[in-house]
């Protein structure tokens, strides 16, 4: 602009200089006005959205790991495709802004070692597990298997931190729930126990003193129960099939064992009776929720008869119960082995969608 306003010899611009500066001003207005308008509109939209969703409310963060592929032989029964399917569904539905769908960090050695023995961690890392130990886990060893297990645990740590962040109240790991991992061994498709690692991480970081683990996967959270057996700062709750894997159950702080063939009504009645007791006894600062898709009637390993609407009612009851006592929740997906992977993705997706759409502002608890 200044170059168009070079003064003439008397120190004043000539008529042609004034005309050309007006032309330039007009051109800049045409170019920049729409840009200024769109910025102002964006600010206004954010402001309005902020008012609608409640002051202090913060966007939900979702952590993904599906691009850290777990290499499995052909015909392996673990439905690894469900993770990419789920992430695609979450993206397509725009449940959160793209910047809040985040690549999970890998859990670090010192984080894993708070829940696992140094010896087990070292042997997993170096590929020194025996054939028998690998059979018990159910996966062949590979460096990618180790990385994937670290990312899945890292996603639960990140979700726990995000749920505890001011105003957020909930966050999601699109994987996790590897509750059959013990301090010194893995089993049942579980290498590292993500919930145990995350609970100990937020405690070590001073973000939470007491944690409750709400395990609604159809299989008992045996590894979690054992890891926290003598730790009163983490309350373990598991609702599962009495006769299903694992056939030797550990003792959680509260176990609810259901009969084979349990339906929506049976399951929800048991959950409604147990969960208030759990939350009261736990007095926790953070909940880690394992929203297993495997109580579904068409699950290959589930032995229960829950429907998709029944599983959604379960999720709603758990999340609303936590919200009612201002308890932040880190949500993990856990198991799901339905004959059609799309069904597993549907069930996990409805959990994530519910968490994203519920209103979680801090002040709501007092009037709930
Ligand atoms: Zn399971």
Image: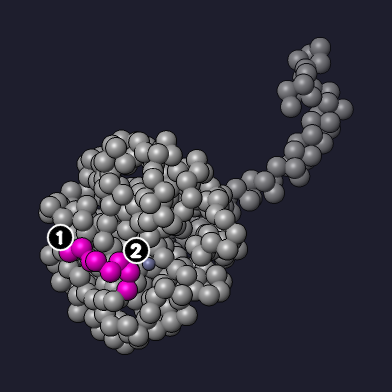
**Residue 367 appearing in the image:** no
Residue 84: image location, x then y, percent: 56, 59
Q: Split into 4 quadrants, where in the image is the N terminus?
A: top right
Tell me the number on the disc at residue 108: none
Q: Determine contact: label 1, label 2, CB under 8 Å.
A: no
Figure check: 34 above or below 360: above
Q: How many marks?
A: 2
Q: Which residue is mark 2?
A: 290
Nearer the viewer's eye, disc 1 or disc 2?
2
The residue beneath circle 1 is 283
Tell me which segment is drawn in magenta. Answer: 244-251
> Would you say residue 101 sits in the magenta stretch?
no
Q: Residue at x 81, y 16 (%)?
A: 8
Q: What residue do we see at 15% from left, 60% from top?
A: 283
Q: Nearer the viewer, residue 223 or 288?
A: 223
Q: Residue furthest toward the front?
A: 131
């Amino acid at each position: 602009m200044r170059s168009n306003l070079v003064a003439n010899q008397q120190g004043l611009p000539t008529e042609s200089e004034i005309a050309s500066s007006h032309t330039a001003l007009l051109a800049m207005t045409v170019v920049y006005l729409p840009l200024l308008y769109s910025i102002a509109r964006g600010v206004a939209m954010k402001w309005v959205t902020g008012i609608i969703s409640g002051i202090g409310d913060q966007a939900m963060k979702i952590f993904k790991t599906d691009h850290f592929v777990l290499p499995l032989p052909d015909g392996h029964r673990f439905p690894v495709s469900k993770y990419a399917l789920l992430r695609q569904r979450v993206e397509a539905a725009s449940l959160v802004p793209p910047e809040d769908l985040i690549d999970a960090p890998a859990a670090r050695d010192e984080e894993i070692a708070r829940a696992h023995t140094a010896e087990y961690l070292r042997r997993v890392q170096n590929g020194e597990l025996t054939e028998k130990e690998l059979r018990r886990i159910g996966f062949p060893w590979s460096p990618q298997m180790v990385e994937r297990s670290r990312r899945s645990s890292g996603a639960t740590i990140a979700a726990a931190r995000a749920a505890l962040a001011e105003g957020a109240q909930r966050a999601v790991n699109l994987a996790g729930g590897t509750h059959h991992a013990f301090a010194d061994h893995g089993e049942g498709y579980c290498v590292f126990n993500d919930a145990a690692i995350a609970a100990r991480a937020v405690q070590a970081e001073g973000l939470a003193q007491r944690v409750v683990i709400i395990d609604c996967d159809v299989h008992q959270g045996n590894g979690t129960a054992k890891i926290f057996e003598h730790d009163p700062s983490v309350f373990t709750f598991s609702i599962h099939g009495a006769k299903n894997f694992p056939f030797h159950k550990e003792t959680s702080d509260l176990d609810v064992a259901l009969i084979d063939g349990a339906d929506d009504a049976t399951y929800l009645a048991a959950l409604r009776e147990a969960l208030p007791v759990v939350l009261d006894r736990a007095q926790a600062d953070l909940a880690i929720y394992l929203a297993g898709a495997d109580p579904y009637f068409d699950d290959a390993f589930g032995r229960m008869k829950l429907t998709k609407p029944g599983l959604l009612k379960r999720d709603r009851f758990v999340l609303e119960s936590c919200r009612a006592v201002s308890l932040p929740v880190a949500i993990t997906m856990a198991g799901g082995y339905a004959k059609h992977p799309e069904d597993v993705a549907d069930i996990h997706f409805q959990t994530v969608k519910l968490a994203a759409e519920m209103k979680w502002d801090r002040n709501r608890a007092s009037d709930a």
